[in-house]
Amino acid sequence: MKFATLRLLTCLYFLIFILCIFSARAHNSIDSEAREKYLSTLHEAEKITNDNLTVTARAKAQYQIAITLDEIRDLFNQDIISHGRIMGLESSMLIKELSRAGYTLELSAKTGLYLSHLQYYRVAIRLEPKAPFGDHARYMLLKSHFYDSFSDDPMVPISQSKETLFEMLEIAESLLTAKDPAISAEEVRFILAIHYLQAINERIMAKDQGRKKFDNLLQELRKDYPQSLKPLTLEALAQ
């Protein structure tokens, strides 16, 4: 009974998290001005990536494409969560124009929500690892991959290779000391703690080592964010 209750708490947390993300954007909508701005931003960024400009400029353009597509897909997912489908003529037009421009948004067969275009973050990081936007690109890659990777239980990823898990562990650990105010230290530690549990399950990290790292992060979250649901969620996942 206790295990079932904790698992229910875990599922409720992730539902609350998703609803909070999209309710925060509930005032937004895609009108003709927003649609044209998104397309213009993507067009300009793509032009930079195709021109013979500096590596830094091309890296920043890739990052801009990723951020723009994530903002669009969040708005689309808000419609799906609230109404079960994309709402509005401008949104319907935008999704078609994105496909024509080579930015097709893919729906997850498991969650029914649009997935993030992670490859643009990866390219930006590879081109300019030490760019000013580099840590935020890594953070967005980490977070977008994590929330795209499961339906209701992060301990049962839909599709996550060991190589990807290694990549996420490395990224998350590198962000523990990040100073960018746009990066949530709470979120980084939360996701990293879950990846440690996944690494134990996948037998790519010794249980004693993984649990020690997990317990340290859990204690930090309890201390630094006493009102957060994340420690309770981690406790449920660790059972």
Image (cartoon, rainbow, N blue to C red):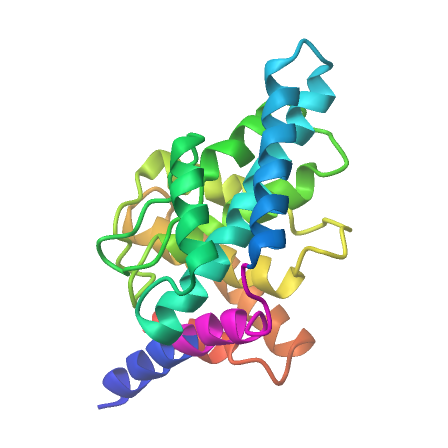
Left or right: 2, with 229 as reference point: left
Q: Give residue 218's position: percent from left, percent from top.
A: 54, 69
Viewer-side residue, 70 vs 227: 70
Residue 19 is covered by the magenta coloring: yes
Left or right placement of residue 198 versus residue 67 in this view: left
Q: Which residue is drawn at 57% across and 40% down?
A: 39
Q: Is residue 211 visible?
A: no
Q: Quarter of the image holding residue 208?
A: bottom left
Q: Which of 222 and 100 is in front in this view?
A: 100
At horizontal 46% and vertical 33% (from top left) the residue drawn is 119
Residue 126: % across, % down: 58, 24
Picture layout, residue 89 above or below residue 162: below
Q: Quadrant of the N terminus?
A: bottom left
The x, y position of residue 205, in whole percent, is 38, 45
> Residue 49: in sight, yes or no?
yes
Residue 158 among magenta residues: no
Q: What count of labels does the image hold?
A: 0
Observer-nearest residue: 7 or 76? 76
180 vs 69, nearest the viewer: 69
Horizontal and vertical percent position of residue 173: 58, 46
Q: Which residue is drawn at 30% across and 79% down?
A: 7
Image-based side of 117 in relation to 2, left or right = right
Which residue shows up at 63% across the image and 69% down it?
220
- Give the position of the C terminus as an image quadrant: bottom left
Q: Is residue 193 above or below residue 223?
A: above
73 relative to 227, above or below? above
The magenta stretch is 14-30
Name the image quarter holding residue 5: bottom left
